[in-house]
Image (tube, rainbow, N blue to C red):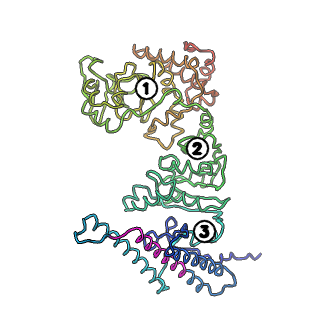
Amino acid sequence: MDENKPQALPNLDYKIVVGDSLIPKFDGEILEIDWDKKTTISPKFNVFIANGKQLLAQIVTKQKAYFDPKTKYKPKAAAEIRNLKIYLLINQLAYNKLYYLDNNTKLIDSGLGLTAKEKQKNLAIDLHIAFLDNQTKKLNQLLANHDLPFDHFDWKLDFPEILNDQVADFMGFDIVIGNPPYIDSESMLKSGNEKLREYLSKKMKFCKGNWDIYIAFFDYGFTLLSQNGNLVFITPDKWISKPFGYELRKGLKNNFIKIAEAGRKVFETAKVDSIITFISANNKDKIKIDKFENYKPFNYSEVYKNTFEEPFAYDWLFSDNVALLSKFNLLQNKFSDYAICENACATSDAYKLQDYVLELGNNDFNSEKHLKVINKGTIGKYTSKWGDRQMTYLGNKYLKPIVNKQKFLLDFANSYGTKSIVPKIIIKSLTLLDGCLDIDGCVIPGKSTLVIKTKNKVKDLYFPLSILNSKFAIFFIKQKYRGSSYNQGINFNYDMINNLPLPKMNLPAQTPFINLVDKILKAKKSGNATQHWENEIDIMVYKLYDLSYAEAKIIDNDLSESDFDKYNLADNATGESNFL
């Protein structure tokens, strides 16, 4: 059976252009047509506005003729369209020059001479006018020589019939598909693109912070979509969790259709973890997650977006336990409803502290004269390891690190000093989520720590402390914030802890946790074992979240069903152990 050979798409070569698809440029410089120019009261400006509209209308007419099957000599039509576009750019440059001179007047020497600042201003005006004149000269050279390439691309100029509302109602594209450049913020700055970053940051709402260049492509690409259009980009996966992707995640949260995890083997040269993102012009109430197996995609999960919350990180959607995380995310209360976690100190304070730290040695600790110092290496569960484990602080080692209390409070008369002398929980911010209690307000939290202060009584910290030291807390944060992984742990921040979902808990409901924490603290002070009580708190937390044994087993693989079943949170309001 004879099959018809595929036919070439008509006029395709005309729509294959060379240019910057993000910013209209000519000869390496930004040259944008101001499509929003309105008629003014000044006739000298209106001439250029009217001329621009006339040229655009001619371009549209010529392009329609070009695509007409009856048009036989297409190279001639393409050359005419090329020249009309060049005339339109020359017209824009003439308008820019007139507008600039109308708003920037050179200073005249009245005989007393110009100041250095005034000379600099005049020079800047001369240089800018010379730049505009040079651009115009180059465009005229293109008109004189039709063989020279005209490398300029403007979406509203090249596709006016669907994108330029001066010609017709905006229609947009049904499909926008692309592989934007993989250039991060540091590389852009090193390559001298500061002005480009500044320009895009002002122009595009998603380009905030240390954004990578593909963020701008997401931003602009979405504006090109038709009413029912779809965008598909393959990019690095960093934006789904890093701060620079926040505006994109927040702005298009309702529009994401699917994200497919493509991995590191997509490209030979780009050694990054890649994802394929599908975005709709219409709102979607669910997002699909796809993964690849043997180079074939399969649907991994589907999540309702009502579980999404600030800062709208999406890395948790790829967790093996996404269903369990979705269940937790539906809870309305947060850890911050019971206690507020914050940074212990500014980076500058952490380094300043180094000069104050002394070794106590064999001397006795005096809370009237001294403050202890601990950091992430000497924070344990419930209590610190001060005096038991050596602390390394910015290269120096101490077993019993202290500072002179009076001198410290005098030189750190800020929030750091205030935090150091009140009862608080001190938390590691790297690798493990361990929190210890400073009951007497005599411990300075060192570098890489977080703190939770009490507003009233020390015992108000007992319930939050039990949650922080539970297996649930570290499980949830590691699964929810996969993009913050560090050395098989997590680089914690206070937002992660404050946003930890918690069921609503009144004081009587907190009592079993408070009483067990009290027992743990007393036992640790006496050097007695506490693991059985810590295990019991873990089970209490599982019951608090209404987990089944199978769900709890995901968090705690060593949990036995008999231990899980013997504890009933509703029956235990005293904190008496069910395991003794």
| Res 377 → quadrant | top left
Q: Which mark is residue 62?
A: none
Residue 133: where, in percent of width, then height?
40, 77
Residue 94: where, in percent of width, then height?
46, 76
Q: Residues within 10 Å of mark 1 (few under 14, many from 20)?
A: many
Marks 1, 3: nearer the viewer = 3
Tag 1 residue: 453
Sequence-first disc among 2 and 3:
3
The quadrant of the picture occupied by the N terminus is bottom right
Residue sitting at 52 percent across and 67 percent down?
21
> Circle 3 sits in a helix, a strand or a loop, which is it?
loop
Query: Which residue is situated farthest in the right direction here?
Result: 1
Tag 2 residue: 317
Part of the protein shown in magenta = 82-106
> Circle 2 sits in a helix, a strand or a loop, which is it?
helix
Sequence-first disc among 1 and 3:
3
Q: Main secondary structure of the magenta part?
A: helix
Say left or right for 71 vs 20. right
Residue sitting at 64 percent across and 55 percent down?
280
Q: Which mark is residue 164?
A: 3
Residue sitting at 55 percent across and 29 percent down?
556
